[in-house]
Amino acid sequence: MNEQLTHLDEAGRARMVDVGDKDVTLRRAAARAVLRMTPATAKRLVEGRLPKGEALAVARLAGIMAAKRTPELIPLCHTVALASVEIEVEVDIEGGLATVVAQVRAAGRTGVEMEALVAASVATLTLYDMVKAVERGALVERVELLHKSGGVRGDWQRQP
């Protein structure tokens, strides 16, 4: 077995990693994504004055739903019984930015980094979908893992 490339078998074919012998530990991960828009659009977002309605609540719900469906979207991801998914959206009107942070927690044998990244991405894409009627040029940027904890490799934190 190739120790460095865990998702490949001896013949180089993709496979799902066997996590059956790993210990169950508390796993946490947080990810962030950003939507850049004009200050006028950001103001409408905060005020709930978009043609599709109240975007912030819809984006939070979309992020939670996406985290739960990660194994259906990302090949070779394990199904993880999520204990918690929290989606926070902070809007900087003057800067024209909506920053989405997704925090995911589970007790399991594999990490929840992908669930956090998918949640942040889909919540931000949902915001784009909600603002595109007034600003098609809005830009999704900086989808990134912020930190993870739990598991054999231990904790990891993005450096500023």
Image (cartoon, rainbow, N blue to C red):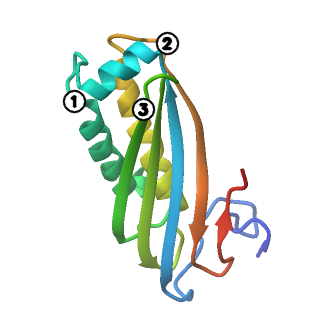
Graded by Cα atoms within 10 Å as few (under 14), some (14 to 19) or many (20 or more), the crowding at tag 2 reads few
Query: Disc 2 marks which amino acid?
Result: Gly
Q: CA distance from mark 3 to mark 2?
A: 13 Å
Pointer 2 or 1: first along the chain:
1
Q: Please, what secondary structure does the residue beneath circle 1 have?
A: loop
Q: Please, what secondary structure does the residue beneath circle 3 have?
A: helix
Nearest the viewer among 39 and 136 is: 39
Graded by Cα atoms within 10 Å as few (under 14), some (14 to 19) or many (20 or more), the crowding at tag 3 reads many
Q: Which residue is mark 3?
A: 125
Q: Please, what secondary structure does the residue beneath circle 2 have?
A: loop
- Residue drawn 57% across and 77% down? 150
Query: Disc 3 marks which amino acid?
Result: Leu
Mark whose residue sits in front, 1 or 3: 1
The image shows residue 128, relative to residue 147, as above or below, that is above
Tell me: 8 left or right of 97: right
Query: Disc 1 marks which amino acid?
Result: Glu
Mark whose residue sits in front, 2 or 1: 1
Residue 17: image quadrant is bottom right
Pointer 3 or 2: first along the chain:
3
Tell me: 46 left or right of 90: left
- Residue drawn 49% across and 12% down? 137
Nearest the viewer among 18 and 10 is: 18
Q: CA distance from mark 2 to mark 1?
A: 20 Å
**Contact (CB < 8 A) between labels 1 and 3?**
no
Q: Which residue is mark 1?
A: 54
Q: Which residue is mark 2?
A: 137
Residue 81: image quadrant is bottom left
